Amino acid sequence: MLCIENPSGETLYKIYELAEGHPGNRMAFQAKFEIDKEQFNRFKDAVHNPAVTGDWARHAHHHKLNSDNPMSRVEAEQFVRGIANRWLQSVRRSRWGGAVDAQR
């Protein structure tokens, strides 16, 4: 999914969901990766709401915005790619660290 050159709002949110894991993990995930409520609301507005990003958005219905300053499509993509890269690095570290510990 990270190889897609022009991801849709749906694709970006799926990348976020895959990194986050279960929605019950949201608070811990956001704390670990320093995602504040306003950033997440700006992101959600961009990827979910067609009032912000038109047909690119995941949903076809307009709803009340969560933020006064929604992300642009470019900002939303940068936001998710940054999170995905940090998340992948943390997975690699935990796997490599676990493999090293197992060899000791």
Image (cartoon, rainbow, N blue to C red):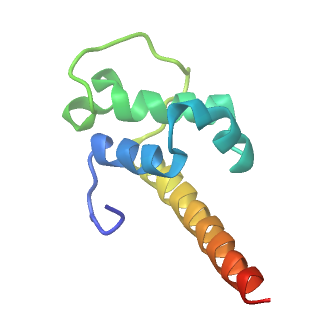
**Which residue appears at 35% of the width and 28% of the height?**
48
**Which residue appears at 55% of the width and 28% of the height?**
41
Q: Is residue 99 left or right of residue 9?
A: right
Can you give x and y, in whole percent of width and height, for residue 38 in the image? 64, 29
Quarter of the image for the C terminus: give it: bottom right
Extreme residue toward the bottom, this view: 103
In the image, residue 35 above or below residue 49: below
Q: 96 or 33: which is nearer to us?
A: 96
Q: 71 or 17: which is nearer to us?
A: 17
Q: Is residue 20 left or right of residue 9?
A: right
The answer to which quarter of the image holds residue 85 is bottom right
Q: Is residue 63 left or right of residue 31?
A: left
Quarter of the image for the N terminus: give it: bottom left
Can you give x and y, in whole percent of width and height, for residue 49 in the image? 34, 24
Can you give x and y, in whole percent of width and height, for residue 75 in the image? 48, 48
Can you give x and y, in whole percent of width and height, for residue 11 in the image? 30, 48
**Which residue appears at 72% of the width and 82% of the height?**
102
**Which residue appears at 66% of the width and 29% of the height?**
37
